[in-house]
Image: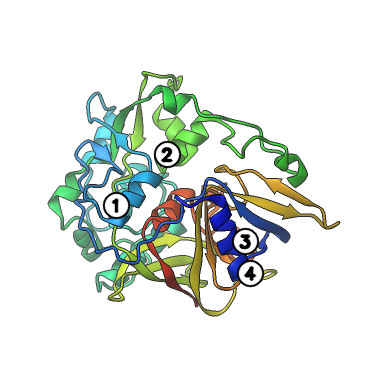
Amino acid sequence: MYQLKKLSTAIAMIGFSTVVFMGQSIAAEPTNSMIVDNSATAPTEVSPVTNGISQKLTGDSKAATSLNKLLPTIKYTIENLSDTAKEVNNINWTTDADIDRNMGTKLQALLNWHHNGVGPVDGYWGKNTRKAMQAFQNANGLTVTDTLNNETWQALIKNEKLMTQPVLVSYQLTDADVNVKTTTIPTDSVAKSKLEGMYYESLTEALAEKFHISEKYLKSLNPNAGFTAGEIITVYNPGNPNTKPVSRVVADKDTETLYAYDENNKLVASYPTTVGSTATPSPTGTHTVKVKVNEPNYTYTGSDGRKSIIPPGPNNPVGSVWIGLSKPAYGIHGSPDPARISRQASAGCVRLTNWDALSLLGVIKNGATVEFS
């Protein structure tokens, strides 16, 4: 853990001053920062089967240590599941079968567990699920298609243990789960700067992000839930993230996907992303990772030149993560609105869900190459 003074010095040394966001200027001044150095990390193979504990990685590699600090451990069971949850867990696709919500949930889970992110799990076939499937096809030398086919499905379920891992699980809410800080987020940046933190706006928003699921789907799976401590609810099982150190990422503007590669140039993960816009395009060419910050705050510069410091939190303009590039004012970051990833414009940066940004933060190397294509 670096002290703020050290981090501020590092930012100053690379000339990092502002992050352009939605046509505005935001300068990063991190607090409670964590810079993760994976430069000497060796790849760690982690079983995709979580056996009752998700996002708790074994081993003492730098990647595993970093990810265990960044991601919440999820202890679950498969007891007392609803008929719907059981159907999702046991469903199997057959050629030309429709992808209903239960099948869609299983498909999204399998893609996620193969480290091809789909964004918030909602059970629906959509552009992010299709892109994740195509990234999986590319990584496995399969024919790239616009719809699911038998070749792809068989590759997804080739690992028998992975196929039998529960998609929907039972989770008992803890005091820490339900006592999260919440707030109402104003639209005005000056008003935002007066908040204690850019917290979640509701408990269900916080729970949805913890379990990588859409808030609407979480509520539909738990129609009678009060979301109180001790209550058992049905949630999506996120599985374990990629633990192989990332030496290179490619932000593809056409597919709106961030592809992550290891030192052998093997694709190890992909994430749905928003990359720039027509009004504020992303940079071109190749750059490197210079700054990695967890839970930064930001300084907003208004049209009148006045600055307002926006505090850290999952709902700040760039989410929970900032990975700054050698090109000042540009970076890879999280998002306060995961459902809109690859469905909205950005101001030139690479925007991910907060959980994907945290997962990448835990494994991307200092000095990693960032290419825009």
Circle 4 crowding by C-alpha within 10 Å: few under 14, some 14–19, many from 20: few
Residue 44 image-quadrant placement: bottom left
Q: Are marks 1 and 3 in contact (CB under 8 Å)?
A: no
Circle 2 crowding by C-alpha within 10 Å: few under 14, some 14–19, many from 20: some
Label at residue 210:
2
Q: Please report whichever mark, 2 or 1, sits nearer to the chain's N-terminal start.
A: 1
Which of label 1 and label 3 is nearer to you? 1
Q: Which residue is mark 4?
A: 15
Which amino acid type is shown beneath numbered disc 4?
Gly
Circle 1 crowding by C-alpha within 10 Å: few under 14, some 14–19, many from 20: many
Which of label 2 and label 3 is nearer to you? 2
Q: Please report whichever mark, 1 or 3, sits nearer to the chain's N-terminal start.
A: 1
Which of label 4 and label 2 is nearer to you? 4
Whether residue 357 sits left or right of residue 300 in the image: it is left
Residue at image point 15% right, 55% down? 159
Label at residue 345:
3
x then y, percent, for residue 112: 33, 53
Which of label 4 and label 1 is nearer to you? 4
Q: Which residue is mark 1?
A: 64
- Badge 3 marks a residue whose secondary structure is loop
Residue at image point 42% right, 60% down? 271
- Badge 2 marks a residue whose secondary structure is helix
Q: CA distance from mark 4 to mark 3?
A: 26 Å
Q: Please report whichever mark, 4 or 2, sits nearer to the chain's N-terminal start.
A: 4
Nearer the observer, 290 or 199:
290
- Res. 74 visible in picture: yes
- Res. 348 visible in picture: no
Which of label 4 and label 3 is nearer to you? 4
Which amino acid type is shown beneath numbered disc 2?
Lys
